[in-house]
């Protein structure tokens, strides 16, 4: 007896690096592999929400290119930050502007809950996501956020699709938290950067995870207090992702180098990198997409149950 696998797609956070998700989706579409549920964090929620709403991967790629060429993006603070972090050659006047923008952002961080304008990210989301409820998506969809008061992981499955994705994308420090049902919600990546375990809990029995995080081996030295703070965050994120990804059956990790999360200037390259990573993983993807026998299904259920009852060492010892 064979049973169709319920495929869950877990799309991780990573800012501009998340454009690589689109390349992976293009390969899955060519293989006619359609997820039964999509769970996304941050940029993964934006890409996943668009796909769940019925947008095809090629259309999503075209929409991304169109947005990055629009006056809406070119005049945004998000682009200004990306230009400053991209490492591209800049004129003297541009470098001076970038310098003062950085100083202004540091001052703003003291007096405001976010450096970026919430309107910038709202316009970005609205460009890709229709104004519908989560319950109305073509493919079941979940957006993952973090409750800043309780510290809980919040899986959003009802209500406004756009606002839920906005909450999932509210990078702490860069954007203010988003209130939903009395909760102050921020980026899901704080505690669940690649939501593989959420996809499993939502009913998937096969989880394909896409991780677009920065490679932990990329290390530029520790010269300032900021360098140490950032490095500590990278290490914490690496350990958290490692735990998250234990729940995935396959992890697709495009080789994205040190591209900054605000740097959208390499959009085409990012999409190509995602496509290449998915092609490399095709044998395993095809195997996982095949119908599963009853015996193998029971084995998978037992393994999934063991994941939830494994005793992990205490953080204090």
Image: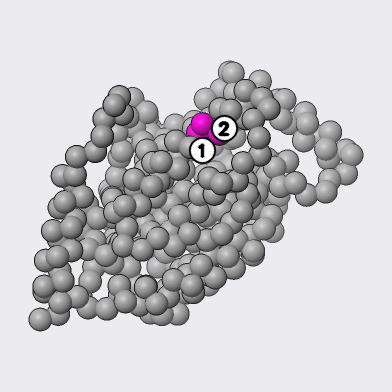
Q: Is residue 233 covered in magenta? A: yes
User: Is 29 situated left or right of 72 in this image?
Assistant: left
Q: Name the residue under label 1.
A: 234
Residue situated in front as seen by the camera: 161 or 29: 29
**Quick one: which residue is furthest to the right in this view?**
92
The disc label shown at residue 280, or none: none
Can you give x and y, in whole percent of width and height, for residue 144 in the image? 35, 45
Q: Give the range drawn in magenta.
A: 230-234
Using a 10 Å C-alpha cutoff, classify the residue at mark 2 as few (fewer than 14 neighbours), some (14 to 19) or many (20 or more). Answer: few
Q: Residue furthest front?
A: 317
Compared with residue 239, is residue 54 higher up or lower down, i.e. above or below?
below
User: Horizontally, is 207 left or right of 64 in the view?
Assistant: left
Residue 212 against residue 274 in the figure, above or below: above
- Residue 309 position by quadrant: top left
Q: Do the residues labelled 2 and 1 touch (CB within 8 Å)?
A: yes
Q: Is residue 264 visible?
A: yes
Is 101 situated above or below 197? above
Left or right of 38 on screen, residue 277: right
Q: Which colour scheme is used?
A: one colour
Residue 21's x, y, as percent?
49, 61
What separation in Å lies between label 2 and label 1 (alpha carbons)?
A: 6 Å
Q: Is residue 176 left or right of residue 153?
A: right
Q: Can residue 125 be seen in this view?
A: no
Element under disc 2: helix
- The disc at residue 230 is 2
Residue under the point 35% across and 52% down: 245
Which residue is more in the foreground, 207 or 66? 207
Q: Where is residue 49 in the image (x, y as percent from the top left)?
A: 41, 57
Quarter of the figure with residue 167 = top left
Q: Quadrant of the C terminus?
A: top left
Q: How many marks are shown on the rendered structure?
A: 2
């Amino acid at each position: 007896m064979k049973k169709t696998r319920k495929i869950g797609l877990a799309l991780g956070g990573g800012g501009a690096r998340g454009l690589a998700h689109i390349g992976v989706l293009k390969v899955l579409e060519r293989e006619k592999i359609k997820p039964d549920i999509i769970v996304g964090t941050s940029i993964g929620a934006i890409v996943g929400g668009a796909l769940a709403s019925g947008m095809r991967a090629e259309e999503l790629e075209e929409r991304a290119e169109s947005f990055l060429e629009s006056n809406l993006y070119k005049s945004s603070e998000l682009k200004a930050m990306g230009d400053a972090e991209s490492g591209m050659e800049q004129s003297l006047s541009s470098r001076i502007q970038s310098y003062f923008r950085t100083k202004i952002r540091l001052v703003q961080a003291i007096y405001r809950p976010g450096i970026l304008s919430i309107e910038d990210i709202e316009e970005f989301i609205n460009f890709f996501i229709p104004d519908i409820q989560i319950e109305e998506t073509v493919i079941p969809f979940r957006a993952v956020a973090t409750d800043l008061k309780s510290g809980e992981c919040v899986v959003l499955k009802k209500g406004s699709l756009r606002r839920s994705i906005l909450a999932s994308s509210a990078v702490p420090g860069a954007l203010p938290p988003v209130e939903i049902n009395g909760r102050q919600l921020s980026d899901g990546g704080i505690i669940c950067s690649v939501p593989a375990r959420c996809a499993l809990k939502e009913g998937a029995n096969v989880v394909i995870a896409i991780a677009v995080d920065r490679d932990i081996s990329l290390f530029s030295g520790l010269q300032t207090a900021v360098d140490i703070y950032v490095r500590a965050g990278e290490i914490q994120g690496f350990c958290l992702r490692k735990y998250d990804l234990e729940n995935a059956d396959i992890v697709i990790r495009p080789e994205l180098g040190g591209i900054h999360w605000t740097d959208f200037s390499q959009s085409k390259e990012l999409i190509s990198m995602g496509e290449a990573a998915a092609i490399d993983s095709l044998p395993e993807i095809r195997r996982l997409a095949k119908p599963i026998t009853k015996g193998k299904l029971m084995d998978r259920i037992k393994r999934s149950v063991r994941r939830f009852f494994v005793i992990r060492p205490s953080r204090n010892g």
